[in-house]
Image (cartoon, rainbow, N blue to C red):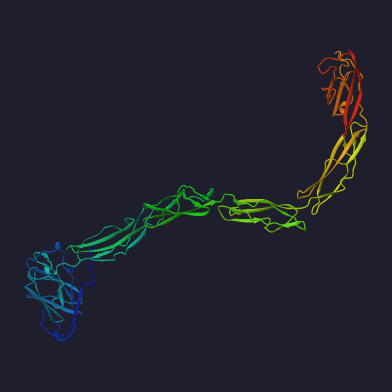
Amino acid sequence: MSATQPTPTADHVSQASTSCLPGLLAYFLKASVFVLYLICFTVHVYAQSSCNCPAPSECKPCAGGISQLTLRYNGFLPALVLIRDNGGAIFIETLQPSEVFTVSGQSNGRFAANQIYIFANGIFSAEIKVNCSLEFDPTASIGWFTIMGARSKDGGTLCCTASAGDTASPVISGCPSDIVIAATSQCTASATWQEPRADDCHLKRFTSTKPPGATFPIGTTRVTYTATDASNNSSTCSFNVVVQDKSAPVVSNCPAQISMKAGDDCKAKPTWTPPTFTDNCGAVTVTSTHTPGSELNIGTTEVIYTVRDNAGNRTQCKFNIVVEDSSIPVVATKPGDVSVPAGANCNAAASWTPPTFTDCSPVTITSSHKPGSIFPMGTTAVTYTAKDKTGNTARYTFNVTVKSAAAPVFSNCPSDVLIKTTELSGAEAMWEPPVASDDCEVPVITASHDPGTPFPIGNTTVTYTAIDQSGNSTTCNFTVSVQLEDAKLSIPQIITPDGNGVNDTWQIENIRLYHTNKVVIVDRWGSVIYSASNYNNDNTIWDGRDTSGKVVPTGTYFFTISVRSGDSWIEKKGFIEIIQ
């Protein structure tokens, strides 16, 4: 950066004075005309900064006398300036306020004396030494003039006097304010700014710790500009570049809603794969409201994972775990069946202690009947239903029975019936069925036999039963007796047990019609040679043998056959011939 010539600033000290003096109007070369007049004017005197001092590397000590001066006119109004040495006038010109001009020696490259004299508008203003004892101080005023620079005949540009050395630090303007930018995905950011400007008479270098467009890491980086002049005076300008992490961490594999059934203890321990979190700028801190395997109650539980990066950016993963009540309500206390007697209106009020239910969640209980309800005759099912919030349902049922206290009553129960028949198969019997009545119900009547039913030979009990809805019962019994007027048996008079297969056994026809019978055979002396009950012509039959198993001799034998018909016995007696 090149040095700049500053205009007067706070580093320059401005002084002003006003004079009203008589003086010469003009002094003209080769003319001795002096015009006197009175003039009033103001002079501005500038105490110049050391910027007018040449850099140490550009100046040398005085040698051979002063050959040239650079002056500045500090008057407020234009003035006719005359400068002369011992050789006469060496400069005459009208100058404007603050105008800088140069005066050169005319005698062999230097001034023709050890001093020069300066007049402004004919008024003596200053005397300046022009030998090597000249003290060059651009910060000091001599009259209405200031020495801005000087050259010696043999040494070139003169250095300022030591007391006017460059002690002012460079001035840096336009120092940027702090810059705040967001980091990229690489956790860095590039920052640009308008560079500041350094002003100094002899600026040697202007450096910075970071140039515009540099890449900065996360955090605060101090950027410093340093301006140094040829006298090693320096100034700094500093500002911060703040790179902020604005990107929140990224969540992956956030679980979806989890639904599961509760166990018998009304709790569940769900498991899941935790989500993963990444951040573009380093480590993260993860917290969660629950962890896999946590014990949860029935209902919906929100699980929240929260991740924060070092910059405080936050991301959350949220999902619900729904623990469902899968258990059916359990009946804790159970009323038993209720039985009550019917009242005068054939109904009754029944009371009981309602059942209770237990479940993992509150249940709603409804019932088909309430304690104290009126029930009709018979049995009525009472059902309690318990339903939990999930819809699981349990039912408990018991019976309320209203019973009649009195049993049914039969009227016109038939008397016993006696039937005589000549048919061995029996006979039909007829009667007037009985009638039954009850105090609150119509009883159901059943009969073991109906009128017109065929009855076998013998006695048969006929039973009518009347049962009401309460289970009370009454019976009506009578007997139907069927008797044969005579036994119809066909009895052979001869058998020939000779083993030829013809007429070897005593076949009594129709004996099978009489299940209850007895056959006895005796000889002529009355001795029993054969006796049998339930004779059937099959496995119970006489083949002519006596009790010892021998075939009896040929001869005449006598028999008695007794058969039962109803409650009486019929006997048949006769003889039989045995022929061998």
> Toward the viewer: 115 or 24?
115
Q: At 93% across and 30% down in the image, what residue appears?
A: 486
Q: Residue at x 84, y 22 (%)?
A: 531
Rendered residue at 86%/18% (across/down): 505
Quadrant where the N terminus sits is bottom left
Please provide percent x and percent y for residue 206: 24, 61
* Residue 363 drawn above or below residue 171: above
Q: Relative to 343, say whether 152 is above or below.
A: below
**Image quarter of residue 166:** bottom left
User: Which of these two is toward me, 11 or 552?
Assistant: 552
Q: How many marks?
A: 0
Image location (x, y in percent) of residue 503: 88, 16
Q: Nearer the viewer, residue 563 or 168?
A: 563
- Can you say which quadrant of the picture contains the C terminus? top right
Q: Is residue 541 visible?
A: no
Furthest residue to the front? Answer: 525
| Residue 295, percent from left and from top | 48, 50
Q: Judge whether 186 appears above or below 225 on screen.
A: above
Where is residue 191, by image quadrant? bottom left
Residue 455 location (% of width, % of height): 87, 36
Picture quadrant where residue 548 is located: top right
| Residue 287 higher or lower than 433, as above or below | below
Q: Classify residue 155 as left or right of residue 394.
A: left
Q: Using residue 281 as the reference point, say whether residue 103 is left or right of it.
A: left
Residue 244 visible in the snapshot: yes
Left or right: 102 in relation to 307: left
